[in-house]
Image: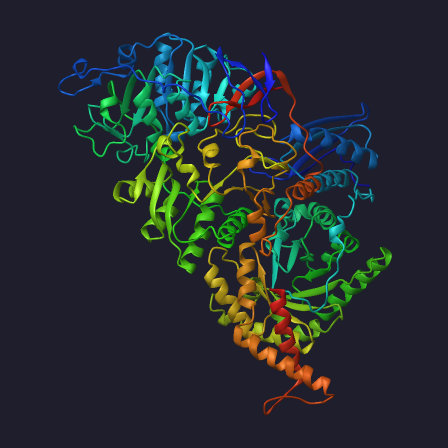
Amino acid sequence: MKLIKNAAGRLVPTEVNGLQQIPFKGVNKYKPTGLKAKPKIKTCIDYPTDGNKVVKDLKTALKKAGLKDGMTISTHHHLRNGDAVTNMLFDVVKEMGIKNIRWFPSASFPVHSHLIKYLEDGTIHHIEGSMNGPLGKFTTEGKMKGIGVLRSHGGRYQSIQDGEVHIDIAVIAAPTADPFGNSTGDRGKSACGLIGFALGDSEYADKVIVVTDNLVPFPCVPWQIQGNNVDYVVEVETLGDPAKIVSGTTEVTKSPDRLLIAEYVAQFLDEAGIMKNGFSFQAGAGGTTLAFAVYLKEKMKKKNVKARFIRGGSTKYLVQMLEEGLTDYILDGQTFDLEGVRSMRENAGHVNTSPFTSYNFHGKGNFASIVDAAVLGATEVDVNFNANVVTHSDGYLLHGIGGWQNCLYSKCTILAIPTFRDRIPVIVDEVTTLCGPGELIDVIATERGLCINPKRKDLLKVMKNSSIPIIDIKELKKGIDIICGGAPAKPKVNKEKVVAIIKWVDGTVLDSVFQVEK
Amino acid sequence: MAKKINKVISGKRGDSVRSDCYFEIELKSSGGIKLDIKSKVQSMYGESIKEMILDMSKFFGLKDAKILCEDSGALPFVMAARFELAIKRLFPDNKKEYLLPFNKKNLYSTKKDQLRRSRLYLPGNEPKFFVNAGLHSPDGIILDLEDSVAPTEKDAAQLLVRNALRSVDFYNAERMVRINQLPKGLDDLKYIIPHNVNLILVPKCESAEQIQQLEKEVEKLKKQHKVQNPIYFMPIIESALGVIKAFEIASASTNNCALAIGLEDYTADIGTQRTNEGRESIFARQMLINAAKAAGIQAIDTVFSDVSDMEALRQSVLEAKSLGFEGKGCIHPRQIQVVHEAFAPTSEEIEKAKKIVDAFNEAEKKGLGVVSLGSKMIDPPVVKRAQRILSLIKGN
């Protein structure tokens, strides 16, 4: 395999799974030209005039959709770890004797370890999406036939739009749908909130199959997926385990150290002057970021400050802020708890978005860059502020990128992370895998204080007299190495064998994940 | 002679264990050291763990043994304590100590009358809480060898606390250890006195003799190890007898810096339940405050144990402050800030204190023997309290 050094100094392959790749050229340095991908022309007279697209079962739908060896099937992660549809889907694909599928999920969860046997027997050739938990281990040990491709949510949309990935069949799990294919995620026994991750697939895939466990008479309104883009509808008994699809209730962390980090982030937003009337922020559903939202809310109330919008990952904490009038809108990318789902159904200020609305590289502008502050996590950050979010320091893939890369474009990106986890330093000399270039990362918030990127002289100045310790990241790293007993050794990897690549938001290759030597 | 032990275990293992490790050492008659390491941080620190274990084996003269190490991300000071524990359990007569270098940030000393608003209890055998405790800025951190440690793990906690005193940065918090009830607690002293402990909490204290006994032993060890820094005592009164003897205990040693009350045991001792209103303990608390002040030392309140109710904590501290207490025990880091805020002087108190101190300075400058503010004469204890209030603002 031919590897070359890209603009970030990382070794990346020039060809992956038989496709030519473009190495990362730098942030905002690559602009593809030409025409966007276009779906085939369809004609309504080819579809039932009564609008009833329901077929007997998934197998019938896949047959009618013309499933063949080597095709690309897409699925979506809004059912999270409660997803039974994807596993059922590949049981059928296997039963049909189909081989070498490119599986194109928006993310994978531990529940999908069911698919390892299909990766082993050649039903699935490789994954393009995320490789979490057991799938990450399988991939990193070099057991997958093809090379994994990891993309951000925005990058996934970009790859569909510029033709890098053509989806043959999209299978969309819909908590509620009508026989025409109009679908929503905000109601039904398997309600998950938003199914916006499937929007691009519904528009660009050759064939679209909606799978639902709550079939309602036409029309299913308001719809998140339009039946006009749907070929077949399949009714099943259940989409999965509701308790794992959405948490009954999300909770803030109880860890005193993480609460301290969250408090520092909220204090920083206030002291840096970011928290002011009409501002906006993004907060995820991790324990630390939830706690951040709680502390920020207290400060906003005290100073009588109102946000214009909050980007979520919506949870009950953001819903409370909306309902108490502390923000005009929640722009929701995915819904994490039942309160979020309820609010989405009931509150006009709780707005559905998709990766197209929020993160699209080929859009005419970018929501993500309008956001005043984004609070994110990371598995590692290096002394140049580069960050890793997909691999563990032992070299194993363990998370997907999610919307993380896209959010880095906010006006102030804050990574809220502990300096070490048990004995594993999070601040390191060089990240194991590069997912986010340091030039886009402004602040590292840790339990020991804040590291501000030297290029943000404005922030350094305004925080000079803060009660939060402001620490040089290199000094912080030194201190952590002392606590942990020296700098950690790098994992032993086979530099000849790339098991997965990390795409940047523009479709270029940012870094490689190598096979870990056991 | 006791039966020779061939195989021992130490430390903790299992899925829920974090920042700790487990050793199994079996003595063999030949074959050298056979080492089996299973570590969560194998790829990052596997080599350095191996080096450390071999170095310790050599140090303790272990030649032929099968060693199993199951590591859940233990920091070096923890791993060293767990390994030494296994050795001590194998060879109870081995007096060698494997001491890691002193963290240079840990060499400070404290003052007898310094702020002791908050003291954070950490279970002495739970290393995962140690490293970041100081980041939450308590006035004192207590490594506890007493009630939070199981009777069978007292030896484990002694070594762990010793290593923590040397290695863990306390970020300038006063370095406190709660020893076991005397006389058993005397055995804890050799693990803490040479390692720069600032303050010893003496639980269930009931007589002046106990403090004198402690003082004698501490002085002996200080001399032996050439310890220069002062080591203060904070007797904890936790029984009816202790309350009655409070003044005698408070004035038993010049090293006493404070008297604390422990209400869980006290209420049990007088045969009642602890309530939020605390009517059952009002006598004990006032008695203790009076005894402490009579002996010229601080009075420190009990811990507040509902970690989820910050408002109740605030009220409890305000009440304690109004009675005359100057500190409160914390069992969760999130309580610290609330305690500090509640103990902080109000703006009226600060205003008044400033006027008094100004008047005092003015009088001193003029060489006047009597300080007066307006038409009122100010007595020395009032000036002292005002100075204290102003020093508290600096502390905040």
Q: Measured from the top left, where is residue B171 in percent x and y?
A: 67, 53
A253 or A225: nearer the viewer: A225
| B239 lies above or below B221 | below
Q: From this viewpoint, which residue is outermost toward the bottom? A: B375
Disc tally is: 0
Q: Quadrant of the C terminus of chain B?
A: bottom right
Name which quarter of the figure residue B211 lies in: bottom right
Residue A8 visible: yes
Residue in view at x 30 percent, y 17 percent: A39
Residue A398, compared with residue B265, is above or below; it is above
Going by the image, does A376 lie left or right of B156? Answer: left
The relative height of residue A393 versus residue B198 in the rendered view (above or below) is above
- Residue found at x 53% / y 37%: A440
Residue A127, percent from left and from top: 45, 19
Residue B274 visible to an observer of this rendering: no
Q: Where does the image place residue A352, in percent across and percent down from the top left?
A: 31, 37
> Can you give x and y, in whole percent of width and height, for residue A66 in the image?
30, 9
Say which quarter of the image contains residue B113: bottom right
User: Would you place residue B154 above or below residue A122 in this image?
Assistant: below
Between A106 and B328, which is closer to the camera in this rendering?
Answer: A106
Check the picture and name the quadrant holding the N terminus of chain B: top right
**Residue A37 in the figure: left or right of residue B275:** left
Q: Image quarter for residue B128?
A: top right
Protein image colouring: rainbow
Q: Nearer the viewer, residue A157 or A485?
A: A157
Locate residue A490 relative to residue A38 in the image: left or right. right
Q: Farthest residue in the left direction?
A: A50
Question: Which residue lies most toward the front here?
Answer: A33
